[in-house]
Image (cartoon, rainbow, N blue to C red):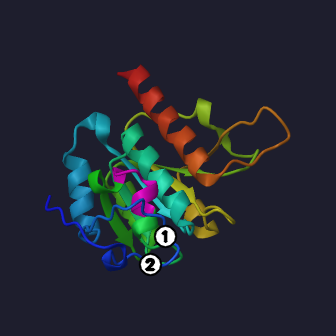
Amino acid sequence: VRLRFVEADRMGVPAGCRHQGVVARRAATVFLSFDRLLKAVLEAEAAEARLLILDSIQDPRNLGSILRSALAAGFRHVILSRERSAPVSGTVARTSAGALAHLQLCQAVNLVETIKILKENGFWIYGAVASRDAASLYEADFSGKVALVVGGEDKGIRPLIQKNCDQLITIPMQSSFDSLNVSVAAAVIMFEIIRSQQLRQ
């Protein structure tokens, strides 16, 4: 890494950004094609055949936080909806705490078609929803190839994508307060999937 010491006005930081006197330049995020991402996850060890699909996550901090949790949990392959999604910006990179550099990302134009192809390749698609009618997260069978779909902050997974999920799952709440931040909910579900899979090994 090459270091340069410059005056504050030459750092090229937008007004209002907190930088603590340090700025790093990085290459733009590289997105894999869906074919390459699918090949990578299919070639991974069976215990790592899992995908995270993010439908319309529009808040960059939520996106960064989800990516951070994804790497920590072992979801190294992530598909983002191209439309209605926050761009993978500096805010996302910062909030991900470096996780962004260790994940394989893909942007999908049509998530429904993407999900259909995943099903053809043996993936079971789980949709995370806030609904008492959905199956409990703790009763789902996460054996085999898993793809988890998490929806946007306001409306969740879009209806057509929900219809194409194999199973809708929810986090059972212990009180009448039934709303978690999307990044928190995603983390809870991803770690439960990993725990469940490890128990079966």
Q: Which residue is mark 1?
A: 17
21 versus 98 height, above or below:
below
- Viewer-side residue, 120 vs 86: 86
Q: Residue furthest front?
A: 7
Magenta-highlighted stretch: main secondary structure?
helix
Q: Residue furthest left?
A: 2
Residue shown at the point (68%, 66%) measured from the top left: 155
The location of residue 139, given as percent across then percent down, is: 60, 30
Helix, strand or loop at disc 2? Answer: loop
The kind of residue tagged 2 is: Pro
Examine the image and state in which quarter residue 31 appears: bottom left
- Viewer-side residue, 129 vs 26: 26
Residue shown at the point (50%, 52%) measured from the top left: 65
Examine the image and state in which quarter residue 84 appears: bottom right
Q: Are marks 1 and 2 in contact (CB under 8 Å)?
A: yes
Relative placement, left or right, of 113 versus 155 is: left
The location of residue 121, given as percent across then percent down, is: 31, 54
Residue shown at the point (27%, 58%) measured from the top left: 38
Residue 115 shows up from this direction: no
Q: Which residue is mark 2?
A: 14
The location of residue 164, given as percent across then percent down, is: 53, 61
Q: Residues within 10 Å of mark 1 (few under 14, many from 20)?
A: few
201 versus 97 height, above or below:
above
- Viewer-side residue, 8 vs 118: 8
The kind of residue tagged 1 is: Cys
Q: Is 84 contained in the magenta span? A: no
The location of residue 161, given as percent across then percent down, is: 55, 65
Relative placement, left or right, of 108 versus 188 is: left
Report the span colored magenta. Answer: 92-99
